[in-house]
Image (tube, rainbow, N blue to C red):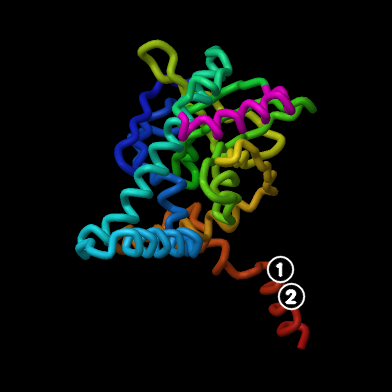
Amino acid sequence: MAKSVPIKRGDVYFIPPIPGYSESLRELPAVTTILDEVKKEAITNWKIRSTAEFCYANPGATMREAFGAQYKKSGEATLRGKTVHSWIQAYEKGAPLAPEELPEDIRPYGLAFEKYVDRFHPRSLQLGETLANLTYGYGGTLDSLLVDASGRTMLVDWKTGKAIYPEHRWQLSAYRRAEWILVREGIETIAYPMPKVDGAMIVLLKPDGGFAIEEFADDFETFLAYKHIWHTRYSGGKPCPDSCFCHRMFAPDLKIVEEVAADVVGG
Protein backbone atom coordinates (compact mmCIF):
# COMPACT_ATOMS: atom_id res chain seq x y z
CA MET A 1 0.00 0.00 0.00
CA ALA A 2 1.42 3.36 -1.00
CA LYS A 3 0.33 6.95 -0.42
CA SER A 4 -0.04 9.07 -3.53
CA VAL A 5 -2.09 11.95 -4.89
CA PRO A 6 -3.44 11.35 -8.39
CA ILE A 7 -4.37 14.48 -10.32
CA LYS A 8 -6.27 14.68 -13.58
CA ARG A 9 -5.99 17.76 -15.72
CA GLY A 10 -7.69 17.73 -19.07
CA ASP A 11 -6.98 14.37 -20.66
CA VAL A 12 -3.86 13.57 -18.61
CA TYR A 13 -3.51 11.73 -15.29
CA PHE A 14 -0.57 12.74 -13.09
CA ILE A 15 0.36 9.77 -10.91
CA PRO A 16 2.89 10.55 -8.15
CA PRO A 17 5.57 8.03 -7.17
CA ILE A 18 4.39 4.76 -5.64
CA PRO A 19 7.22 3.50 -3.39
CA GLY A 20 8.58 0.20 -4.59
CA TYR A 21 6.91 0.50 -7.99
CA SER A 22 7.64 3.93 -9.48
CA GLU A 23 10.17 6.56 -8.47
CA SER A 24 8.91 9.64 -10.30
CA LEU A 25 5.77 11.45 -11.34
CA ARG A 26 4.09 9.76 -14.29
CA GLU A 27 1.98 11.58 -16.85
CA LEU A 28 -0.51 9.11 -18.30
CA PRO A 29 -2.99 9.64 -21.14
CA ALA A 30 -6.62 8.84 -20.46
CA VAL A 31 -8.03 5.64 -21.93
CA THR A 32 -10.84 7.61 -23.57
CA THR A 33 -8.29 9.97 -25.16
CA ILE A 34 -6.37 7.03 -26.62
CA LEU A 35 -9.60 5.62 -28.03
CA ASP A 36 -10.34 8.88 -29.81
CA GLU A 37 -8.16 7.25 -32.47
CA VAL A 38 -11.09 4.93 -33.24
CA LYS A 39 -13.13 6.07 -36.22
CA LYS A 40 -16.56 6.73 -34.71
CA GLU A 41 -19.00 6.83 -37.60
CA ALA A 42 -22.02 6.96 -35.29
CA ILE A 43 -20.79 10.20 -33.70
CA THR A 44 -19.97 11.72 -37.09
CA ASN A 45 -23.44 10.86 -38.39
CA TRP A 46 -25.01 12.25 -35.20
CA LYS A 47 -23.19 15.57 -35.67
CA ILE A 48 -24.33 15.80 -39.29
CA ARG A 49 -27.91 15.01 -38.33
CA SER A 50 -27.89 17.52 -35.45
CA THR A 51 -26.67 20.28 -37.77
CA ALA A 52 -29.21 19.35 -40.47
CA GLU A 53 -32.08 19.32 -37.96
CA PHE A 54 -31.07 22.74 -36.65
CA CYS A 55 -30.83 24.23 -40.13
CA TYR A 56 -34.23 22.79 -41.10
CA ALA A 57 -35.84 24.25 -37.97
CA ASN A 58 -33.98 27.57 -38.29
CA PRO A 59 -33.75 28.45 -42.02
CA GLY A 60 -32.50 31.95 -41.25
CA ALA A 61 -29.63 30.82 -39.02
CA THR A 62 -26.12 32.04 -39.67
CA MET A 63 -23.30 29.64 -40.52
CA ARG A 64 -21.84 30.20 -37.05
CA GLU A 65 -25.15 29.23 -35.42
CA ALA A 66 -25.49 26.16 -37.63
CA PHE A 67 -21.93 25.07 -36.91
CA GLY A 68 -22.45 25.49 -33.16
CA ALA A 69 -25.66 23.43 -33.05
CA GLN A 70 -23.80 20.10 -32.82
CA TYR A 71 -21.71 21.33 -29.88
CA LYS A 72 -24.78 22.55 -28.02
CA LYS A 73 -26.42 19.13 -28.29
CA SER A 74 -23.15 17.42 -27.42
CA GLY A 75 -22.82 19.60 -24.32
CA GLU A 76 -26.36 18.74 -23.26
CA ALA A 77 -25.63 15.01 -23.65
CA THR A 78 -22.40 15.33 -21.63
CA LEU A 79 -24.18 17.20 -18.84
CA ARG A 80 -26.92 14.58 -18.76
CA GLY A 81 -24.36 11.79 -18.48
CA LYS A 82 -22.49 13.54 -15.66
CA THR A 83 -25.73 14.15 -13.77
CA VAL A 84 -26.78 10.51 -14.04
CA HIS A 85 -23.32 9.28 -12.98
CA SER A 86 -23.32 11.59 -9.94
CA TRP A 87 -26.79 10.38 -8.95
CA ILE A 88 -25.74 6.72 -9.23
CA GLN A 89 -22.63 7.37 -7.15
CA ALA A 90 -24.74 9.09 -4.48
CA TYR A 91 -26.96 6.00 -4.33
CA GLU A 92 -23.95 3.67 -4.11
CA LYS A 93 -22.69 5.75 -1.17
CA GLY A 94 -25.97 5.32 0.69
CA ALA A 95 -28.44 7.89 -0.67
CA PRO A 96 -32.00 6.66 -1.24
CA LEU A 97 -32.92 5.32 -4.67
CA ALA A 98 -35.48 7.94 -5.65
CA PRO A 99 -35.59 8.56 -9.42
CA GLU A 100 -38.85 10.45 -9.04
CA GLU A 101 -36.85 13.31 -7.51
CA LEU A 102 -34.69 13.73 -10.62
CA PRO A 103 -35.37 16.51 -13.17
CA GLU A 104 -37.91 15.46 -15.77
CA ASP A 105 -35.39 15.09 -18.61
CA ILE A 106 -33.11 12.92 -16.44
CA ARG A 107 -35.80 10.86 -14.70
CA PRO A 108 -36.10 8.08 -17.34
CA TYR A 109 -32.41 7.22 -16.87
CA GLY A 110 -32.94 7.04 -13.11
CA LEU A 111 -35.93 4.75 -13.63
CA ALA A 112 -33.78 2.56 -15.89
CA PHE A 113 -31.13 2.29 -13.17
CA GLU A 114 -33.80 1.47 -10.58
CA LYS A 115 -35.02 -1.40 -12.77
CA TYR A 116 -31.46 -2.69 -13.09
CA VAL A 117 -30.99 -2.62 -9.30
CA ASP A 118 -34.35 -4.34 -8.68
CA ARG A 119 -33.44 -7.12 -11.09
CA PHE A 120 -29.79 -7.78 -10.27
CA HIS A 121 -29.32 -6.50 -6.68
CA PRO A 122 -25.69 -5.36 -7.17
CA ARG A 123 -23.43 -4.62 -4.21
CA SER A 124 -20.91 -1.83 -4.79
CA LEU A 125 -17.24 -2.26 -3.89
CA GLN A 126 -15.65 0.83 -5.48
CA LEU A 127 -16.91 3.71 -7.55
CA GLY A 128 -15.60 6.78 -9.26
CA GLU A 129 -11.96 6.05 -8.47
CA THR A 130 -8.83 6.63 -10.54
CA LEU A 131 -7.25 3.61 -12.23
CA ALA A 132 -3.68 3.46 -13.48
CA ASN A 133 -1.48 1.07 -15.40
CA LEU A 134 2.17 2.10 -15.05
CA THR A 135 3.52 -0.71 -17.22
CA TYR A 136 1.58 0.26 -20.33
CA GLY A 137 1.14 3.89 -19.38
CA TYR A 138 -2.51 4.96 -19.15
CA GLY A 139 -5.08 6.13 -16.63
CA GLY A 140 -8.85 6.11 -16.34
CA THR A 141 -11.80 6.64 -14.06
CA LEU A 142 -13.81 3.70 -12.79
CA ASP A 143 -17.60 4.03 -12.79
CA SER A 144 -18.37 1.05 -10.54
CA LEU A 145 -16.83 -2.15 -9.27
CA LEU A 146 -19.62 -4.33 -7.94
CA VAL A 147 -20.63 -7.84 -6.98
CA ASP A 148 -23.65 -9.11 -8.92
CA ALA A 149 -26.36 -11.51 -7.80
CA SER A 150 -24.29 -14.53 -8.87
CA GLY A 151 -21.34 -13.43 -6.74
CA ARG A 152 -19.13 -12.28 -9.61
CA THR A 153 -16.99 -9.16 -9.22
CA MET A 154 -17.78 -7.02 -12.25
CA LEU A 155 -16.32 -3.82 -13.62
CA VAL A 156 -19.24 -1.69 -14.82
CA ASP A 157 -19.43 1.40 -16.98
CA TRP A 158 -22.76 3.25 -17.05
CA LYS A 159 -23.75 4.79 -20.38
CA THR A 160 -26.59 7.15 -21.31
CA GLY A 161 -25.86 7.46 -25.03
CA LYS A 162 -27.74 6.08 -28.01
CA ALA A 163 -26.10 2.66 -28.12
CA ILE A 164 -23.21 0.45 -27.05
CA TYR A 165 -20.27 0.87 -29.44
CA PRO A 166 -17.20 -1.27 -30.27
CA GLU A 167 -14.76 1.09 -28.52
CA HIS A 168 -16.52 0.36 -25.23
CA ARG A 169 -15.02 -3.14 -25.38
CA TRP A 170 -11.51 -1.73 -25.53
CA GLN A 171 -12.22 0.86 -22.82
CA LEU A 172 -13.28 -1.87 -20.41
CA SER A 173 -10.37 -4.11 -21.42
CA ALA A 174 -7.98 -1.31 -20.44
CA TYR A 175 -9.78 -0.71 -17.14
CA ARG A 176 -9.78 -4.36 -16.11
CA ARG A 177 -6.02 -4.53 -16.81
CA ALA A 178 -5.30 -1.56 -14.52
CA GLU A 179 -2.58 -2.25 -11.95
CA TRP A 180 -3.63 0.30 -9.34
CA ILE A 181 -6.86 1.69 -7.98
CA LEU A 182 -6.40 4.98 -6.16
CA VAL A 183 -8.85 5.64 -3.36
CA ARG A 184 -9.41 8.91 -1.51
CA GLU A 185 -9.25 8.43 2.27
CA GLY A 186 -9.58 11.70 4.16
CA ILE A 187 -6.95 14.10 2.85
CA GLU A 188 -4.85 11.29 1.42
CA THR A 189 -5.14 9.13 -1.65
CA ILE A 190 -4.05 5.53 -1.21
CA ALA A 191 -2.84 3.31 -4.05
CA TYR A 192 -4.09 -0.27 -3.79
CA PRO A 193 -3.42 -3.14 -6.19
CA MET A 194 -6.31 -3.50 -8.60
CA PRO A 195 -8.56 -6.30 -7.35
CA LYS A 196 -9.25 -9.31 -9.55
CA VAL A 197 -12.41 -8.95 -11.59
CA ASP A 198 -14.47 -11.72 -13.15
CA GLY A 199 -15.82 -9.68 -16.03
CA ALA A 200 -16.63 -6.26 -17.45
CA MET A 201 -19.85 -4.89 -18.86
CA ILE A 202 -21.64 -1.83 -20.15
CA VAL A 203 -25.06 -1.00 -18.71
CA LEU A 204 -26.85 1.30 -21.15
CA LEU A 205 -29.56 3.36 -19.44
CA LYS A 206 -32.15 4.33 -22.05
CA PRO A 207 -34.34 7.42 -22.38
CA ASP A 208 -37.47 5.21 -22.43
CA GLY A 209 -36.71 3.95 -18.91
CA GLY A 210 -35.30 0.60 -20.00
CA PHE A 211 -31.76 -0.71 -19.94
CA ALA A 212 -29.48 -2.97 -21.93
CA ILE A 213 -26.44 -4.94 -20.79
CA GLU A 214 -23.49 -6.15 -22.82
CA GLU A 215 -20.67 -8.10 -21.22
CA PHE A 216 -17.37 -7.93 -23.08
CA ALA A 217 -14.58 -10.46 -23.39
CA ASP A 218 -11.09 -9.07 -22.81
CA ASP A 219 -9.53 -7.51 -25.92
CA PHE A 220 -6.50 -5.76 -24.45
CA GLU A 221 -4.32 -6.30 -27.53
CA THR A 222 -6.60 -4.13 -29.66
CA PHE A 223 -6.49 -1.37 -27.06
CA LEU A 224 -2.68 -1.53 -27.09
CA ALA A 225 -2.71 -1.24 -30.87
CA TYR A 226 -4.71 1.98 -30.61
CA LYS A 227 -2.33 3.21 -27.91
CA HIS A 228 0.55 2.67 -30.33
CA ILE A 229 -1.27 4.74 -32.96
CA TRP A 230 -1.95 7.48 -30.39
CA HIS A 231 1.70 7.52 -29.28
CA THR A 232 2.96 7.68 -32.86
CA ARG A 233 0.72 10.66 -33.59
CA TYR A 234 1.29 12.72 -30.45
CA SER A 235 4.68 11.77 -28.99
CA GLY A 236 6.65 14.24 -31.10
CA GLY A 237 8.88 11.52 -32.49
CA LYS A 238 9.78 9.95 -29.15
CA PRO A 239 10.45 6.20 -29.35
CA CYS A 240 7.74 3.87 -28.15
CA PRO A 241 8.11 2.57 -24.57
CA ASP A 242 9.37 -0.99 -24.14
CA SER A 243 5.84 -2.14 -23.28
CA CYS A 244 4.41 -0.85 -26.59
CA PHE A 245 2.40 -3.18 -28.76
CA CYS A 246 4.73 -2.59 -31.70
CA HIS A 247 7.68 -4.33 -30.06
CA ARG A 248 5.73 -7.59 -30.05
CA MET A 249 4.05 -6.96 -33.37
CA PHE A 250 7.35 -6.59 -35.24
CA ALA A 251 9.52 -8.90 -33.12
CA PRO A 252 10.62 -12.03 -35.01
CA ASP A 253 9.14 -15.34 -33.99
CA LEU A 254 12.20 -16.99 -32.41
CA LYS A 255 10.83 -20.46 -32.91
CA ILE A 256 10.46 -19.86 -36.67
CA VAL A 257 13.94 -18.31 -36.81
CA GLU A 258 15.42 -21.35 -35.06
CA GLU A 259 13.61 -23.75 -37.43
CA VAL A 260 14.81 -21.86 -40.49
CA ALA A 261 18.36 -21.78 -39.13
CA ALA A 262 18.25 -25.53 -38.48
CA ASP A 263 17.06 -26.19 -42.04
CA VAL A 264 19.90 -24.04 -43.44
CA VAL A 265 22.49 -25.82 -41.33
CA GLY A 266 21.04 -29.21 -42.14
CA GLY A 267 20.88 -28.39 -45.85
Q: Is residue 76 left or right of residue 125?
A: left
Q: Is residue 217 magenta?
A: no
| Residue annotated with mark 1 | 255
218, above or below 254, in the image: above
Q: In front: 129, or 113?
A: 113
Task: Identify which amino acid the numbered label 2 is placed on.
Answer: Glu
Q: Is the residue under label 1 in contact with that under label 2 (CB below 8 Å)?
A: yes
Residue 176 showing in the rendered view = no
Looking at the image, which residue is at 51% across and 33% down?
A: 142
Q: Quadrant of residue 195?
A: top right
149, above or below 228, in the image: above
User: What mark, if any, has residue 259 been given in the picture?
Assistant: 2
180, above or below 58, in the image: above
Q: Quadrant of residue 13?
A: top left
Q: Report x, y in % for residue 49.
A: 42, 62
Looking at the image, which residue is at 55% across and 23% down?
A: 99
Q: Report x, y in % for residue 25.
A: 33, 35
Q: Report x, y in % for residue 81.
A: 45, 37
- Secondary structure beneath disc 2? helix
Magenta-tinted stretch: 104-122
Q: Report x, y in % for residue 143.
A: 53, 32
Q: In which quadrant of the rendered image does the C terminus lie? A: bottom right
- Other residues around mark 1 within 10 Å, as few (<14) / some (14–19) / many (≥20): few
Looking at the image, which residue is at 56% across and 27% down?
A: 193
Q: Quadrant of residue 67?
A: bottom left
- Secondary structure beneath disc 1? helix
Q: In front: 264, or 168?
A: 168
Task: Identify which amino acid the numbered label 1 is placed on.
Answer: Lys
Q: Is residue 193 left or right of residue 36?
A: right
